[in-house]
Structure formats: structure tokens, C-alpha cells
Image (cartoon, grey):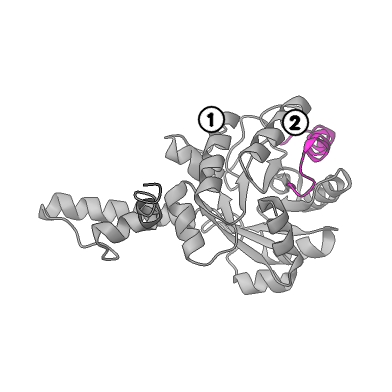
């Protein structure tokens, strides 16, 4: 069974799949070790890892390379950010093929103009509805694995209003999308309305301090969402922990006490050292 098929099987089960955001292999492995069934490759985190803000500065090949590393590092399905698809319908065909080849279970494609920006920032621009739908059609038609998930992300709520966002979501489903990602509903009533108004599976983006009000994931599941991504949780916590540790080192001139005590060996085992050690003598 491919990872795309595994992901579809997860979605067929009762309840909602929760996919925390990884930006590298370390965070992806930690997500898997914590018992989550799916990893989400955050585009904003990928850009940050390369030293850039989430302003569409990262290329398709850079995004695919990171997605491939993450997919190789874990045994659970990986869903990845594919920004705007990096061009028109022609580019979407290649984008889908590259992500599929990297072992990713699915991608989301948004209707922002390019260069895009984080969906929870101001002054976004969207493309005409038909231009985006053409890319959704191209993505759905060009996948080689029928289970590969095409998620249609619309950022139109902030630009054209909630009704237009719902209309775009439903149009994307008709164009071949498997799921709708209505970015940044602005009230709890809007959050609750999305799965009722959109005629297919819905994704909720959980961004602390973003445009969407905070809510319990159990409530989101009861509202009818099938997938929740939590893209920024780990990277924000990593930044906070690093800043605190560096400040303590500069002040005390001593190695700060780790949040979690681990031996050197235990640390390396998190990244598979015990599995690789088993190979040292296996072929002798």
C-alpha cells in the first residue's frame, strides 16, 4: 500500500486526522514517535529552515527536496505544502509528478497570486477563480497514483469574503480536488459553517495567534472536519527554547539544563542509530 493509499484509509475512518507540522526530519520523527498518524510538511517552516520568510521565495525543487527527506525519515503519510503550484497548469503537472516521486501522500495548492505569503498575514492577493480551477484540474488529471491527494486551498476569505471562499471550495471539488482547505475563517461561526457548506472533506489550519479563533480539536472534529494541520507549533516552541537556552548560556557561562535529559546515545537513537548499528556486522 502506498502512503497515499494509507492516508486515504485514515480519512475513511471515523473522526479527524491531526497532522502536526514538521520542517525537517527531526521534527517529523518526533511527530511519528508521539503517535500521530500523519505528518504535515509546513511551507512556512521549510522557508524558515532555509533562512527566508513565507513570501514565496522557496522554489518548487527546494520544497520537494525537503518533503522527500521528511517522507523518507518516517513511516507515516506526509502531506505537503505546494504553495501556488509554482506557475500555471504546465507547472502544476510537473509539481504533482515531483511530489509523487518524493513519496508524499498529497499536497495543497492555493489560489494566491505569486509570490504568495502566509495565509494569516495581511494584504494577500488571489488569482481569478478560473485560473486556480484550471490548476486544480491539471493537478487532479496528472497524478499517476489515483490515491495521491489534491487539496484545494483558497485564501479568498480575506480578500473576497466568506461566501466566495465557500464557492471556490465547492468549485474546486467539482474540478477534481479531494479536499478543501478554506484558509483563515475569522469567527467560530465561520469555522463551524465550513464543513456544512462545503460539499466534501475539509481541512482546518490551526495557527496559534492567527486569523482563526482558537478552538479545541475535539470541537473541530464534531464540526465535521476530516483533517487538522498544526503547522507552526513545533517551530515556535523550538525558537522559544533555543532563545532561552542561548540567553542562559550567555549569562551563566554554563551549559543550560535541557528541557529533557538525554544521553548522547539516546539522542542518536532518536534518529535511528540503533537500526544503523545493527547493520555494522549483519553482512560480515
Secondary structure beneath dot 1 equals loop
Q: Is residue 190 visible?
A: no
Image disc number at residue 252: none
Where residue 109 sits: x, y (%)?
A: 70, 41
Secondary structure beneath dot 2 equals helix
Front-most of residues 159 and 79 = 79
Where residue 186 sits: x, y (%)?
A: 66, 57
Q: Quadrant of residue 207?
A: bottom right
Front-most of residues 188 and 3 = 3
Q: Is residue 71 left or right of residue 182?
A: left
Q: Nearer the viewer, mark 1 or mark 2?
A: 2
- Looking at the rendering, the stretch of residues picked out in magenta corresponds to 125-151
Residue 137 forms part of the magenta stretch: yes
At horizontal 71% and vertical 27% (from top left) the residue drawn is 91
- Pointer 2 residue: 93
Image disc number at residue 57: 1
At horizontal 67% and vertical 40% (from top left) the residue drawn is 100
Give the mark nearest the N terminus, 1 or 2: 1
At horizontal 61% and vertical 70% (from top left) the residue drawn is 217
Q: Are marks 1 and 2 in contact (CB under 8 Å)?
A: no
Q: Quadrant of residue 81?
A: top right
Q: Is residue 184 left or right of residue 26?
A: right
Total marks placed: 2
Local packing at callout 2 (Cα closer than 10 Å; few below 14, some 14-19, many 20+) is many
CA separation, marks 1 and 2?
A: 20 Å
Amino acid at each position: 500500500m502506498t502512503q497515499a493509499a494509507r492516508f486515504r484509509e485514515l480519512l475513511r475512518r471515523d473522526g479527524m486526522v491531526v497532522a502536526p507540522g514538521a520542517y525537517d526530519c527531526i521534527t517529523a520523527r518526533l511527530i511519528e514517535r508521539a503517535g500521530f498518524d500523519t505528518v504535515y510538511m509546513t511551507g512556512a517552516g521549510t522557508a524558515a529552515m532555509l533562512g527566508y520568510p513565507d513570501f514565496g521565495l522557496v522554489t518548487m525543487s527546494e520544497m520537494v527536496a525537503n518533503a522527500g527527506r521528511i517522507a523518507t525519515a518516517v513511516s507515516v503519510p506526509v502531506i505537503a505544502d505546494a504553495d501556488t503550484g509554482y506557475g500555471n497548469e504546465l507547472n502544476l503537472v510537473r509539481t504533482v509528478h515531483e511530489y509523487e516521486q518524493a513519496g508524499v501522500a498529497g499536497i495543497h495548492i492555493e489560489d494566491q497570486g505569486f509570490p504568495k505569503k502566509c495565509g494569516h498575514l495581511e494584504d494577500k492577493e488571489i488569482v481569478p477563480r478560473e485560473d486556480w480551477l484550471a490548476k486544480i484540474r491539471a493537478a487532479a488529471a496528472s497524478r499517476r497514483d489515483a490515491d495521491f491527494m489534491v487539496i484545494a486551498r483558497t485564501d479568498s476569505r480575506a480578500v473576497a469574503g466568506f461566501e466566495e471562499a465557500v464557492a471556490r471550495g465547492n468549485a474546486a471539488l467539482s474540478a477534481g480536488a479531494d479536499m478543501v482547505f478554506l484558509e483563515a475563517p475569522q469567527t467560530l461561526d465561520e469555522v463551524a459553517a465550513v464543513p456544512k457548506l462545503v460539499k466534501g472533506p475539509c481541512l482546518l489550519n490551526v495557527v496559534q495567534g492567527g486569523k482563526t479563533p482558537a478552538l479545541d480539536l475535539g470541537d473541530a472534529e464534531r464540526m465535521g472536519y476530516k483533517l487538522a494541520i498544526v503547522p507552526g507549533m513545533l517551530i515556535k516552541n523550538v525558537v522559544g527554547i533555543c532563545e532561552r537556552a542561548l540567553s542562559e548560556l550567555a549569562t551563566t557561562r554554563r551549559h543550560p539544563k535541557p528541557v529533557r535529559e538525554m544521553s548522547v546515545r539516546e539522542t542518536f537513537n532518536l534518529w535511528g542509530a540503533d537500526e544503523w548499528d545493527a547493520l555494522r556486522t549483519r553482512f560480515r
